[in-house]
């Protein structure tokens, strides 16, 4: 059984989860990758205004079908609130990292976005802080330096009493770069060890990669087993990310992960990537309101059927998630 | 047209209002008055645990039918979150004042609760700060001192970017004390001048008394006229409070106020006061889930039919409530 929660963290987790404690969250926090998707061969031609309009289309259509949305602080979060695109009862997670990474392709360093931080995320009324962290548990001393960033942000999240969600992302190095099958063969081990390392720190939710590559590993019982190991490695509730796989693959991954102990999903491109190439707002909104909404609803259905409510993963029931002493308001 | 909003204030207002911008809020922030209601002749016999249980009964049943609930920081707010009694999509307002008042019965001074404040209200994940302020515009220099408290809290709310709702409450002095009709005769003037004074300060929502006493003033067109004057006096969106009148009276007041420009209601005892005397949690929950819920639904219906969405009162449409520059995240 985990430690009880503080009130701000608990309220935030309640807001980003469904009433039943399942995370069914849509990611719309992409920045340079989103610009590239829209611009194709001419990403520089994509204006900030265009980025924002596209995010508002995604948020106002898909935001109604999940428990929360994840937005970036540059093109999305404030704009979706200001423009009325974020539904009042959708929880809001906001990213804290800078787009891309420092270091080289084989030793990626996460950088925090300048002039931004936990204090501002809390102040704007968001429910949770998210960080994307490039991570290879086997790359020393880089791994430790990356963990130090998590520790630092985690402390800020404790101070401002807001939930902290960490998304570690692995990447190929050396000969794995030109040999995807080789990288796929170690993916499970990487993802599971990463979960162990990251959730030893005081974070609240892990956003995990699927611990296998479905192109190479098709045995369902083996996939379930890997997800169970991931569940055992994670000391906190976890959700599965989509990493831009196609929708049907993501649906499978969500089902397997939730059967193995995940508390839901946090999916982005797998839900909406095809919309980016459609010309005209009307056509895009139509696609998002039909195909996109339908996809999200199917994912929610699967998560609702199989996922573990996040408080259960903490070994607690809904009425015992926090302790409130008679002097709570003084001591808080 | 009013000034645009900052993002935290806007998100908070969106959370305490309905999707349509109407405030349909249930007040459960009573403290000593609540203890007296429960305890009757023996209020000292009412334990803190009992107070909390009663608040959780109210919150978990009525919290589903409005847009938000107002809770106190001693017995209610943290406990309702911790106990799972506060629905995830109900906005949360929390009181900042101490119960009762300093000074005498005829020169009431509002006091802030010690060891509590805007920073903690924001940190716990609430959507808005509420203050009850005893106020007589004609009592100088006390009125100015009371306004100074509002200015001070308003500054904190700006700093933490959270909406600020002010509930000024008038009271009889001198010969008005023994002559309710005399007090009733000046009530309209008091409430309207109070609205003018209070909303000159940087607050976000006014929680106003009904500007007449329905026992003495029954002419509907006169009541509408008084509420129109109140609407003209208030520079910010306003809601009508219940002050423990019986339910049917409150329903009438909400209808009249909303027809005259109010953005909804913030009602407490008129909705649930009879439940206090029922013995046994099961009987109380049954009453709240039927009679209480039905009352709240009828109020919501009336508000939805007649009320002015809060952003309209600000002279703005939903998509233009805040300005977000390209450098918003840096400047915020």
Image (cartoon, coloured by chain):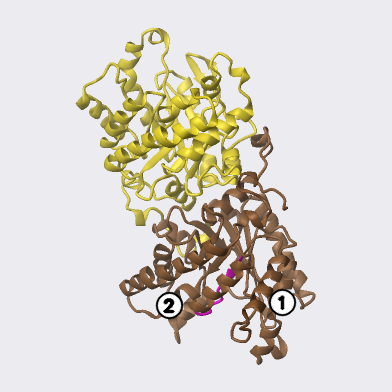
Chain colours: A yellow, B brown
Placement of B301 over or under B244, stated as above or below? above
Tag 1's secondary structure?
Answer: helix
Give the label on residue B190, or none. Answer: 1
B242 in magenta: yes
In front of the other: label 1 or label 2?
Answer: 1
Placement of B175 over or under A315, stated as above or below? below
Can the viewer see residue B29 in this picture? yes
Residue closest to the far right: B141
C-alpha distance separating marks 1 and 2: 36 Å
Q: Residue at x 56, y 19 (%)?
A: A39
Q: How far across and how far down the image is residue B237, in percent? A: 65, 60
Q: Which residue is mark 2?
A: B46
Closest to the observer, A280 or B21: A280
A219 in magenta: no
Can the viewer see residue A154 in this picture? no
Tag 2's secondary structure?
Answer: loop
Q: How far across and how far down the image is residue B280, in percent? A: 32, 76
Q: How far across and how far down the image is residue A153, in percent? A: 53, 36
Closest to the observer, B274 or A84: A84
> Are the residues flagged by discs 1 and 2 in contact, CB closer than 8 Å?
no
Question: Local crowd at mark 1 within 10 Å, few (<14), some, or many (≥20)?
Answer: many
Closest to the observer, B327 or B306: B306
Whichever of labels 1 and 2 marks the residue nearer the N terminus, that label is 2
Q: Locate residue B185 relative to residue A84 in the image: left or right.
A: right
Check the residue under mark 2 and report the chain it is in: B
Q: Which secondary structure type mostly characterizes the magenta part of the structure?
A: loop
Range shown magenta: B239-246
């Amino acid at each position: 059984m985990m430690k009880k929660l503080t009130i701000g963290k608990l309220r935030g987790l309640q807001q980003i989860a469904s009433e039943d404690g399942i995370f069914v969250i849509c990611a719309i926090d992409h920045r340079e990758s989103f610009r590239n998707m829209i611009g194709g061969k001419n990403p520089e031609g994509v204006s900030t205004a265009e980025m924002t309009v596209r995010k508002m289309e995604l948020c106002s259509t898909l935001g109604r079908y999940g428990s929360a949305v994840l937005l970036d602080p540059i093109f999305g979060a404030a704009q979706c609130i200001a423009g009325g695109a974020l539904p009042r009862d959708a929880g809001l997670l906001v990213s804290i990292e800078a787009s891309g990474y420092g270091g080289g392709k084989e030793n990626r360093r996460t950088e925090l976005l300048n002039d931004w931080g936990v204090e501002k995320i809390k102040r704007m009324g968001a429910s949770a802080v998210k960080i994307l962290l490039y991570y290879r548990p086997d790359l020393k001393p880089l791994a430790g330096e990356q963990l130090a960033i998590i520790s630092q942000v985690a402390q800020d999240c404790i101070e401002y009493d807001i939930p902290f969600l960490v998304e570690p992302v692995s990447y190929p190095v050396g000969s794995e770069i030109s040999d995807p099958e080789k990288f796929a063969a170690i993916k499970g081990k990487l993802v599971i060890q990463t979960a162990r390392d990251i959730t030893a720190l005081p974070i609240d939710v892990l956003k995990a990669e699927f611990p296998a590559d479905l192109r190479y590993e098709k045995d369902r019982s083996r996939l379930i087993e890997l997800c169970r190991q991931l569940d055992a490695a994670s000391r906190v509730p976890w959700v599965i990310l989509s990493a831009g796989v196609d929708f049907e693959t993501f649906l499978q991954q969500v089902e397997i992960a939730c059967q193995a102990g995940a508390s839901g999903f946090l999916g982005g491109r797998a839900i909406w990537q095809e919309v980016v190439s459609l010309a005209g707002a009307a056509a895009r909104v139509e696609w998002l309101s039909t195909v996109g909404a339908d996809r999200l609803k199917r994912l929610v259905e699967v998560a609702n059927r199989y996922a573990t409510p996040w408080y259960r993963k903490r070994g607690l029931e809904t009425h015992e998630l926090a302790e409130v002493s008679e002097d709570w308001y003084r001591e808080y």
